[in-house]
Image: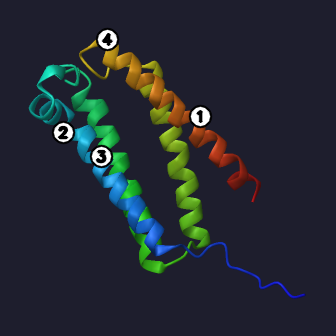
Amino acid sequence: MSYAVTDTDKINRIGWGLAAFAAVSGAAVLAGAPWLFPKLLPATGTAFAYDPNFVPAGGAAVVGLWGLSALLYAAVFAEGQWRPFTRQLEAALSLVWVVALTWLVSGPQIFASATTDQTAKFWIGFVLVAMVLSMIPKVRR
């Protein structure tokens, strides 16, 4: 019996397209939360209002990292596969994300509402742990 060798660096463009749509949708919801939720769900009021001290630095940092991630993944999508250089860029960007997410969990107040802020920090912490765990096999390569 013969097994074909598969190139694990090739990407599934349909899967990547769906993931890109989900990522852009999620980023739009997060960026528009203070305006979106009160209009769609008036009972939420200002629960999703960002802390005014967070937006200039923290908001800009997160949006900047989203932009860098989008550029990297767009380059991989255009190539149709990972290259050693894009893998290295992804590793470096992942480390920057780990630092940023750690800062978000332990640092400034993100949302004006304490309850929303604590809930967001919990889920950011969850994403942080998942990201660190996903980096382990990549480091072993």
Among the 4 quarters of the image, the one containing residue 88 = bottom right
- Check the image and report above or below for 59 versus 45: below
- Label 3 secondary element: helix
> Label 3, label 1: how many angstroms apart (C-alpha)?
20 Å
Residue appearing at x 41%, y 77% in the figure:
78
Number of residues whose C-alpha sits closer than 10 Å to that of mark 3, classed few (under 14), some (14–19) or many (20 or more): some
Q: Is residue 43 left or right of residue 128?
A: left
Q: In the visual, does 91 lie left or right of 32?
A: right
Q: Which of marks 3 and 1 is nearer the N terminus?
A: 3
The quarter in which the C terminus is drawn is bottom right
Where is 51 relative to 22, above or below? Answer: above
Picture disc at residue 27: 3
Q: Earlier in the sequence, mark 4 or mark 2?
A: 2
Say which mark, if any, is on residue 32.
2
Q: Name the residue that disc number 4 marks.
A: 114
In the rendered image, the residue lying farthest to the bottom is 2
Q: Mark 1 points at which residue?
A: 129
Q: Residue at x 58, y 76 (%)?
A: 10
Q: What element carries label 2?
A: helix
Q: Where is residue 128 in the image (x, y as percent from the top left)?
A: 54, 35
Between discs 3 and 2, the one toward the N terminus: 3
Q: Within the image, what quadrant is residue 140 found in?
A: bottom right
